[in-house]
Amino acid sequence: MRIFIAGATGAMGTRLVGLLTEAGHDVFGSSRNDTGRAAVDALGATGIVMDPFDAASVDAAVAEAKPDVIVHQLTALRSMSGNLKKWDRDFALTNRLRTESTDHLLAAARAHGVRRFVAQSYGGHWTNQRTGGPVKTEADPLIDDPGKEARQSLAAIKHVERATTTAPGIEGIVLRYGNFYGPGNTMSRTGEMGEAVRKGKFPVVGGGTGVWSWLHIDDGAAATVAAIDRAAPGIYNIVDDDPAPMSEWLPYLAEQLDGKKPMRLPAWLARPLIGEFGLALMTTVRGSSNAKAKRELGWAPHWSSWREGFRSGIG
């Protein structure tokens, strides 16, 4: 197949380029500049310079690639402040990529006869409803209001999911990835989040009862290849087998990073520091089930639990 990866120079995009070229596909990948285009070429694919916010540029890139499948992996997560009270500000560019760029890519797909479209979404914790059981499936609705700090980000996630799965004439597939860890990610030994955990700057708040779903970046890439090959249209949670509360995974992660034991803060003390949204991340969010992806994609994570992944795969 001819496959066009929008966002081929990111942590996920570079892995997809490698896996798909090794499988014998003709791979084309976008970057925003010539340096990135050359990096895609060096991976064995064909790099294309594309401005994801310019409809004409997106159309021209898709016209050049002539793909059978478009894979939307556009994000902008390299300069996060870590301030949970500024979530929407930090995700502003990614939110535009999930709205404006999604629309441009879908329009180009329709214009050039591309029938299959695979888009990145998120399902690691905060988008899930915070009532009921600790783990949610694709059949459960997303939360109505995540808190004022993340309303724009939720709207963008809902947009990419709705636009992808309802586009006329398109086989739309949405992958809700869990919280990434592994080499090249912010959650690694050298990443910003990993460094914060190692230095003891990431506390357990309240009872640490917020449930998170994790995913090694390489497992995410493998699941994406499986989705390209055989997913029916729809939404899939791509997470590991072990959703867990913060009180379990955070101290273990700190230990694996040779870091300080996380401090514990009562909720009332943390609230003014991290806001209501931040408090929810620590205490009330819910994880996600991967049963549908395992059943329908024939995929299973190599790192089935963050316990093993943090120990030997975090990078």
Image (spheres, helix red, strand yellow):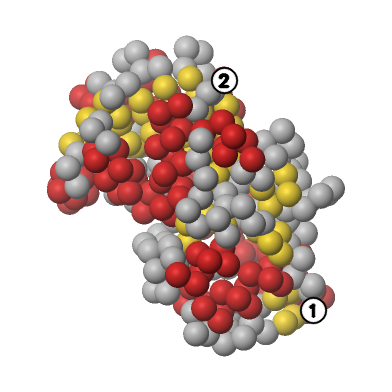
Q: Position of residue 294 (x, y in %)?
A: 57, 39
Q: Residue placed farthest to the bottom in the image?
A: 260
Based on the displayed image, in which of its 4 quarters is residue 192 positioned?
bottom left
* 112 vs 304: above or below: above
| Mark 2 surroundings: few (<14), some (14-19) or many (≥20) residues within 10 A | few
Lateral position of residue 9 relative to residue 196, left or right: left
- Secondary structure category for the residue under label 1: loop
Q: Nearer the viewer, residue 136 or 205?
A: 136
In the rendered image, is residue 235 in sight? yes
Quadrant, the N terminus: top left
Lateral position of residue 147 relative to residue 34, left or right: right
Q: Position of residue 174 (x, y in %)?
A: 53, 33
Q: Measuring 74% from the left and 37% from the top, which residue is drawn there? A: 140
The disc label shown at residue 266, or none = 1
Q: Which residue is mark 2?
A: 166
Q: Measuring 61% from the left and 52% from the top, which residue is drawn there? A: 241
Which amino acid type corresponds to the residue marked 2 in the rendered image?
Thr
User: Of label 1 and label 2, which has the lower sequence position?
Assistant: 2
Q: Nearer the viewer, residue 150 or 267?
A: 267
Q: Nearer the viewer, residue 225 or 304?
A: 304
Which amino acid type corresponds to the residue marked 1 in the rendered image?
Pro
| Mark 1 surroundings: few (<14), some (14-19) or many (≥20) residues within 10 A | few
Q: Report the Cα–Cα distance between label 1 and label 2.
A: 44 Å
* 172 vs 301: above or below: above
Lateral position of residue 270 relative to residue 184, left or right: right
In the rendered image, is residue 56 in sight? no
